[in-house]
Amino acid sequence: MMSRKLACALLLAPSALFPVAANAGFYTGDELYAVCTTERGSDAYVEKTYECIAYITGAVDAFNTTRKVNKLDSCLPADVTIGELKTVTIDYLRRNPKDRKGSASEQVFAATRKAWPCKDAKPEAKKAPVKKKAPVKKRVR
């Protein structure tokens, strides 16, 4: 006789084969904030800390890869640490609770852009002032 747990597992297993909508994201900002602010000393602290760091660094790597593919430099300083990325992200999430309903990756992006704004790749050239032509006077015949 099959146990109830095994029967439930067998019934639910096929649902893992159905794709999730691509725009749903893996985490919301609320979920990432909860993971990243797990209480020190709790049984889940070490696991959740690694999960937080892995998510943030993965998101930042994806942003940097996208910029590189588009022939743009990273906006982050070369000496930025993983700890700084985590701190900036948690601070941003803490200060923007309304935004946390959205995708966590969008929140990581917003946090890093706020902390380290991208400089324009090419400074906009100053345009020379346009000389106005004197109005043409019509000759009266």
Image (cartoon, grey):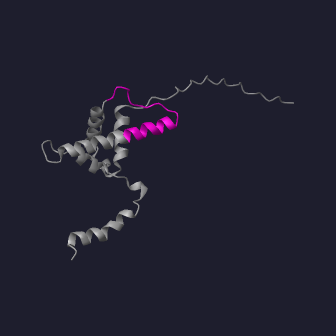
Q: Residue furthest front?
A: 1
x and y percent of residue 55 in the render?
A: 32, 44
Image quadrant containing the C terminus:
top right
- Confirm whether the magenta stretch covers residue 64: yes
Residue 106: horizontal and vertical position, in percent?
Answer: 37, 45
Whether 26 is among the magenta residues is no
Left or right: 5, with 65 as reference point: left
Give the quarter of the figure containing the N terminus.
Answer: bottom left
Above or below, 126 relative to 108: above
Residue reaching furthest bottom? Answer: 1
The residue under the point 59% across, 25% down is 127
Quadrant in the picture for residue 18: bottom left
Residue at (18% x, 44% y) in the render: 45
Above or below, 131 against 50 in this view is: above
Q: Residue at x 37, y 53 (%)?
A: 25
Residue 129 position within the rendered picture, expressed as x and y whole percent measured from the top left:
61, 23
Is 76 located above or below residue 17 in the figure?
A: above
Magenta region, residue range:
59-80
